[in-house]
Every structure is written in structure tokens, then in C-alpha cells.
Image (cartoon, rainbow, N blue to C red):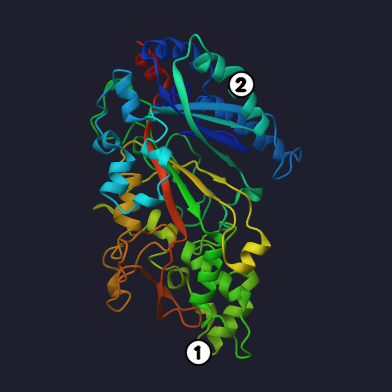
Amino acid sequence: MALDQKNIQGDIWPRLPKKSEVFLFFEITNSAKFKEKLSGFSKHLTSAHDAQQILSEISRRKANGELGPDDVIDAMAANLAFSAKGLKELGKEDLGDDVFKKGMYNDMVVEGLDREAEWHGEFKGSRGVIHGVFIIAASTEQAVQNFLIKVLNPTFKNAPDRSVKYLFAQTGVVLAHECEHFGWADGVSQPLIKGLDKPSSEKLAPPPVKPGIIIVGAEGDTANHPPWAKDGSFMVFRRLKQLVPESIQWVTESFKSQATNEKGELMIGALSCLSSRLMGRWRDGVSLEQKPHSDDAMHDEATLMKSNNFDFQDVQWQDKCPFASHIRKTRPRGDRLDENGDLDDTHAIVRRGVPYGPKTQRTETLSGISMHDRGLLFVSYQSNLRNGFRYMQKEWSNKVSYPAGKDKNYGGAQPGLDPIIGQWAEGDEQNNYANIPRLDDPRKLEKIKLERIVIAEGGEYFFTPSFSGIKELCK
């Protein structure tokens, strides 16, 4: 059965069109009044059908030359999601997901490797109980503010009909060329959804995932969710601080011994290749399997390999892409085959995050010290949190032995942690490493000690209901 795009909130699929985005966290202060107001407010929410029309118009105008790569058109979109505590306040207690019910703090701090001292207080309840989040996306920051002033405030906040308390907001802005702060194209290696997305033209791209891996009640959803949750999705919000100057310094120190030529000069192209191996993609988002050699760094690669009598033309992407690379850890392909040899897409998620904070300044890069707060407001959607985000972080990124069985490729050595978001316990000096094929001879490994360049500063698990689900919540 085809999915009803008018019943699905648009950030789940295809995504909300945006250049600026605000996540406004709130507490419900009067549940009866909130339900009354929510019923009328739902007309302002953006469906998958609405979002797809806006994105199609943007694509059409860019294809016709009417818009440049970073040009914008006037657009406004809004979505809404609830925490487990928020749904309980509205009379819905069990969604059939135990991870959602206990919340991110218990899951990722108490039972995980997020560090208590690094979580911001508002995510721990210092400003009130997080019951939900309004997601407001638009072409400009001013448009976001206008929606807040003209729509949200009169509906929920203004006396005498006040039904919510705004707790705090997190604001992000899409960077030029849609890159994240580390400099890589954002949103790459996204799973395509069967019945919604067009097949990928990328070489060796995996097939689309079943829609029920992302959307509750659709084909592939095997969990026991209540009927009212159909066409909804579990949303992860996570504030991830990115230490960009420190990451540049760490990469340089880690790889300079193999990125220095016979004259003692540090080759920038070689460093670019090695840092791309950590990420698992070139900076423009092209996969290593599609383009094993970077155009702007071929000379450096050839020079270093020649010193070891190794022909770089013989190097394939498998030789260059570490099993521990970030994208290979979080979006595995051949490493996740079922008994029929098909891709096991059980743990797939779709990501909808946005960067926050200013671009890295030259003074920061030169000093190697972050002087401004920046990072990623990470957002993902999945129909099962245990199978989705939680599994990806805890069982893939945080495990030195994943992908399993790869020690035979590495002479008995394990792949190591995800070098970007992998976590290890405080004081653990044994497991904070990744094994990276050397640039001068990819048959040899370099064991790299990792640094914490991404810091989890808080977040929460939410459920994004369908429009029919919202009607049920308003009863």
C-alpha cells in the first residue's frame, strides 16, 4: 500500500526545506488547553506532500538556471514532536519502544558513554520538563521569527490561553555548499526509502530501505506500535559540539610522519587524503569506491607510494577506506548482508540535522583552539530507536570490533572506533584507536590514537506523530 504523504510530517521525508532552523523546546502547562489549541495549529504543520512540492520547485528553478547553488526562495515549514513525558501528559504512555520511554539521558549518560559533566543543564531538566519540540524551518532567520511571533505565540503562549512554557531554543543555519563544520558535504550516504525516493545513480549504491524501517506501520516495521502511531517516526535530537581547530591539529600530528616528503615538507594533498579516510568520503561527498583517488592529491599519493615501490594506480577503494571510517561504521554496505545476501537495512536511519555556530576562523585554525561554539544539531528518524540511532552509536561506532570478522583482513588487529563520533570511557587508553591504511602503502596499517573532536552536550528522544495521530492526541 502506498504511503499517504499528506499524513506524514515533512521532516521525516523528504525533509523540511531550510536555510535557518529553530528547535523550540517546551513544557505543557495545561494539557486540556494544549489539546484544544493543537487541533487548530495542525494546519500550520508541513506534510511530506507539502515539503516535496517546495523542494521540487527549488530543484526545477535551479535546473532552469533561475537559482544559484546557494540561492533561496521564500519558504516556511513547521513540524512538531513529543517526548515520552510529553505523550504521557497527553494520555499516551506506551509506544512500544523501551528506549524512547526511558529517554536519552538515561540511555546515553546513565547507561552509555556520554559524560554527565558535558551535558547542558537544560537537557537535564534545569529549566523544566521537556514535553515537546517545535521545529521551525525557513529561508531566513527573520522568517522563523515571524512564524514564532505571528503563529506560535498567539496559539500556545499568550495569556489568558497559555498552555505551554518555552524552555529554551537551539538554532542552526545551513552553511555554504551545505557542508558541516569539519568541511565535508552534509547529508551524504542517506538511505533511500522504497516507494518514496528515486533509485540512486551512484556506483554500488545500496538498494532503497523498506519504508517501515523509518516510518511506523509501513512495510518493514516489525515492532508492536499502537494503531494511532501509524505514519509517525521516532526522532533523535542531539547537540554535538565539533572541535574543528583541534581536529585539524590532531589529524596533522597523527599523519605528518607519512605525509611528509623527502624534502621534509608537509604535503597538504596527502593530509586531505588521510582525513578523507577517517570520514570515508571525499570532502565533496563522493565515495571512495566511486573515486579511489582525489584529483587534487594524486601527485602526493603517487610520490609517497613510489617511495615504497607501490603503484598507486593499483589501489582500490577497499584498500583506502578503513573499516573504522565514520561513514563505513554508520552506513555499512557489504558488511551487513542477510542470509539471502541482501542488504540488512534493519538499523538504517535518515538524518535531518543542521550546523550551528560560526565558521572556523583563521585565528582558531592557527592556534588549534576553538574560540567559538559550533557543531551539529543532529536529528535522525527511525521506526525503532533500539534498532536505529542507539544501535548505530553503541554497537557500531563505539565498538572496536565492528565490523565483525575484519581482524582477518588486518592481520589480527581490530578496526577500532569510529574516529569522528566513537566514544570511550574516561581513562580508557586501550580502546581509543582506529586502524588506518597507510598512504604510502595501503597494505600496512597505522594505529591512530583518537581525540575527542565531537562532544555530546545533550539531547532527547521524541516521537513525531502523523496528522491522524495528532487528531488522536487532541481527543
Q: Is residue 412 left or right of residue 75?
A: left
Query: Label 1 belongs to which residue?
Result: 308
Residue drawn at the location 47% of the way across and 14% of the way down: 162
Q: Nearer the viewer, residue 272 or 140?
A: 140
Point out residue 220 in the picture as x, y percentages from the top left corner.
31, 36
Q: Is residue 405 left or right of residue 71?
A: left
Point out residue 85 in the picture as x, y percentages from the top left corner.
32, 28
Q: Residues within 10 Å of mark 2 (few under 14, many from 20)?
A: few
Query: Label 2 belongs to which residue?
Result: 149
Residue drawn at the location 54% of the way across and 70% of the way down: 249
Q: Residue furthest right?
A: 66
The Cα–Cα distance between marks 1 and 2, rounded to whole angstroms, is 65 Å
Quadrant where the C terminus lies?
A: top left
Q: Indicate which disc, 1 or 2, sits on the residue closer to the N terminus.
A: 2
Q: Nearer the viewer, residue 157 or 390?
A: 157
Q: Nearer the viewer, residue 98 or 273?
A: 98
Establish if 92 lies above or below 319: above
Residue drawn at the location 62% of the way across and 62% of the way down: 364
Amino acid at circle 2:
Ile
